């Protein structure tokens, strides 16, 4: 991409604003030294709009901009089920999970496991999560982000990895969740505006300058097969998105785990001023999730149309032949579009992509350090650690995790449809964790040993299903979760002889009561989803 001076000014301004805001909100107030609650939960002071923006900024990363756009290129709109079903999942989390977590006064999700089951199981799951964050999430986001820099600017992979890591570390390691959450508000503005600019220009390009509606009509008429949410068995992508089972099967496992029990997502809601603020923030995030496919999936489909239309390619000139996406290199689709943007908008769109990458990196770093520090260091290494030492260990943990991820990231080179790769391998761990949490939350008879047996047995069950490649991996997730729940029920009944466990959660009346505003939001989101699926079934 040939960056003009204007593009460089816009992008540099974005970087400076993020660093300034991150460091400004990170400063210690006069007479007050940052304590554990300040560093890991932003002093429990986040308003609803900051929570909603931060949830989206933490979620939307290179996985979506690069990976999901690449899946849009080859699969089409069906991949948007991840986003649209996430909207209804957020409503479920806000109504039924969040009230219990906030009532428990948690710093981390593993702490719930300790209160409900045991320290032993909490430690097992904490190690699971740290490994997942470092070796899958952080590494893949760094890899995809560096791939974008390499494709767009020609920056060598290793320099891109290190540069992104240092940018995220510059404010998040010092300021903790407060710095991450408040900069996320700015990041999400860049993210959405830049994404909309790219979508607009991609559709305008398809229509040869006749506008986005003409471009949208042409995309639909040219590739009608890419505008079906429910794929037929004959579709070669059915193995990744298995038709109706996407709506009633394993995708619920992925979404409930991710939005309900994933530390770097749920941590924002735990930092809310109140349960009401947290639920309003979740409702805002749910509405924004409805918009995301138009920012990340639609450009991928438009890119497919452009690449396969000789007249459009000819009009774009030789520049369009550089880093051209293909059926074997679909994750080049979004970076390729960026290099075709006009002067000025390149800087905005590149800032949006960088915002998505850096905000997710910062969120994952903060959550990795929170889990290690609160669930392993203060539990097993130094129970007497004061706030100053706890915060220091949190910063060191984040730095070490980032170094490991930087080493791992280049090793991911060669994977295609990275978004699907990440979902599939997260799916080895998530069904067992989801089963343990759901049974622990809503079935009082669940015992500690049953939860341990369930968590540990879920891994070999998930790996065992890999021997049956004819079963879509999303269905494998659903079956793994169901089998894990059966194991938990069986062991619980043997252990407890049918009696309630002494640590069972009491779900008293009124716990799940929500405001009129939240209920109206939930109803509106449900109606919009029905309309969307009806239009694109």
Image: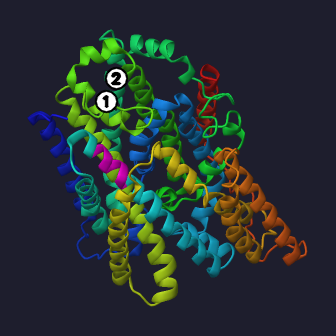
* Left or right position of 472 against 487: left
* Mark 1 neighbour density, 10 Å: few (under 14) some (14–19) many (20 or more): many
Residue shown at the point (37%, 48%) measured from the top left? 144
- Indicate the position of residue 139 as horizontal and vertical percent values: 40, 59
The spot of residue 300 in percent (x, y) is: 42, 30
Task: Verify whether residue 174 appears in magenta.
Answer: no
Of 242 and 327, which appears nearest the observer? 327
13 w.r.t. 195: above or below: below
Where is mark 1, residue-wise?
A: 337
Question: Where is 25 relative to 416, above or below?
Answer: below
Figure quadrant of the N terminus: top left
Label 1: which secondary element: helix
Image marks 1 and 2: residues in contact by CB distance under 8 Å: yes
Looking at the picture, does residue 59 appear above or below residue 335?
below
Farthest right residue in view:
497
Q: How is the image coloured?
A: rainbow
Q: Residues within 10 Å of mark 2 (few under 14, many from 20)?
A: many
Residue 348, image x and y in percent?
24, 35
Left or right position of 216 against 109? left
Q: Position of residue 511 (x, y in %)?
A: 68, 57
**Residue at (54% x, 35% y) in the render:** 79
| Segment tinted magenta in the rendering | 142-149
User: What is the chief secondary structure element of the magenta stretch?
Assistant: helix
Q: Residue 202, which numbered label?
A: 2
Q: Is 146 in the magenta? A: yes
Give the CA distance from mark 1 to mark 2.
7 Å
Residue located 48% across and 41% down the image:
284
> Is residue 184 visible in this depiction of the protein?
no
């Amino acid at each position: 991409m040939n960056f003009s001076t204007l593009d460089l000014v816009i992008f540099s301004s974005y970087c400076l604003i993020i660093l300034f805001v991150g460091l400004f909100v990170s400063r210690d107030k006069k007479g007050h030294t940052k304590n554990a609650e300040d560093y890991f939960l932003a002093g429990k002071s986040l308003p609803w709009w900051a929570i909603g923006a931060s949830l989206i900024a933490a979620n939307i990363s290179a996985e979506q901009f690069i990976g999901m756009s690449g899946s849009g290129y080859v699969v089409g709109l069906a991949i948007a089920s991840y986003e649209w079903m996430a909207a209804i999942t957020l409503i479920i989390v806000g109504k039924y999970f969040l009230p219990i977590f906030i009532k428990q006064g948690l710093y981390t999700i593993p702490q719930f496991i300790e209160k409900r089951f045991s320290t032993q199981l909490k430690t097992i799951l904490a190690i699971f999560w740290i490994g997942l964050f470092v070796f899958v999430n952080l590494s893949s986001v760094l890899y995809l982000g560096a791939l974008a820099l390499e494709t767009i600017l020609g920056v060598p992979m290793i320099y891109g990895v290190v540069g992104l890591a240092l940018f995220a570390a510059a404010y998040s390691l010092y300021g903790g969740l407060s710095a991450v959450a408040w900069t996320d508000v700015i990041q999400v503005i860049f993210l959405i505006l830049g994404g909309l600019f790219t979508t607009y220009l991609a559709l305008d390009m398809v229509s040869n300058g006749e506008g986005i509606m003409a471009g949208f009509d042409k995309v639909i008429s040219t590739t009608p097969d890419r505008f079906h949410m429910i794929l037929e068995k004959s579709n070669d992508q059915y193995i990744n998105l298995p038709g109706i089972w996407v709506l009633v099967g394993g995708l619920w496992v992925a979404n409930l785990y991710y939005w309900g029990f994933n530390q770097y997502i749920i941590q924002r809601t735990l930092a809310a001023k109140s349960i009401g603020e947290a639920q309003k923030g979740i409702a805002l995030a749910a509405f924004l999730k409805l918009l995301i496919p138009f920012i990340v999936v639609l450009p991928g489909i438009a890119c497919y149309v452009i690449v396969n239309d000789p007249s459009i390619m000819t009009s774009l000139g030789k520049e369009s032949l550089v880093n051209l996406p293909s059926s074997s290199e679909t994750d080049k689709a979004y970076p390729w579009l960026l290099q075709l943007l006009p002067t000025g908008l390149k800087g905005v769109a590149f800032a949006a992509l960088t915002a998505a990458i850096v905000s997710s990196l910062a969120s994952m770093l903060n959550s990795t350090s929170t889990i290690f520090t609160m669930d392993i260091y203060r539990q097993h290494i130094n129970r007497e650690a004061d706030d100053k030492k706890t915060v220091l260990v949190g910063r060191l943990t984040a730095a070490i995790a980032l170094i490991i991820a930087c080493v791992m990231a280049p090793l991911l080179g060669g994977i295609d449809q990275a978004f699907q790769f990440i979902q599939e391998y997260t799916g080895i761990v998530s069904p067992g964790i989801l089963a343990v949490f759901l049974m622990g939350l809503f079935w009082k008879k669940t015992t500690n040993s049953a939860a341990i047996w369930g968590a540990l047995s879920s891994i070999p069950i998930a790996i065992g299903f890999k021997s049956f490649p004819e079963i879509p991996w999303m269905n494998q997730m659903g079956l793994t979760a169901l089998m894990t729940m059966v194991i938990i029920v069986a062991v619980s009944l043997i252990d407890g002889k049918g009696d309630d466990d002494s640590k069972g959660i009491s779900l008293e009346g009124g716990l799940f009561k929500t405001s009129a505003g939240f209920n109206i939001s939930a109803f509106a989101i449900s109606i919009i989803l029905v309309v969307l699926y009806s239009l694109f079934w």
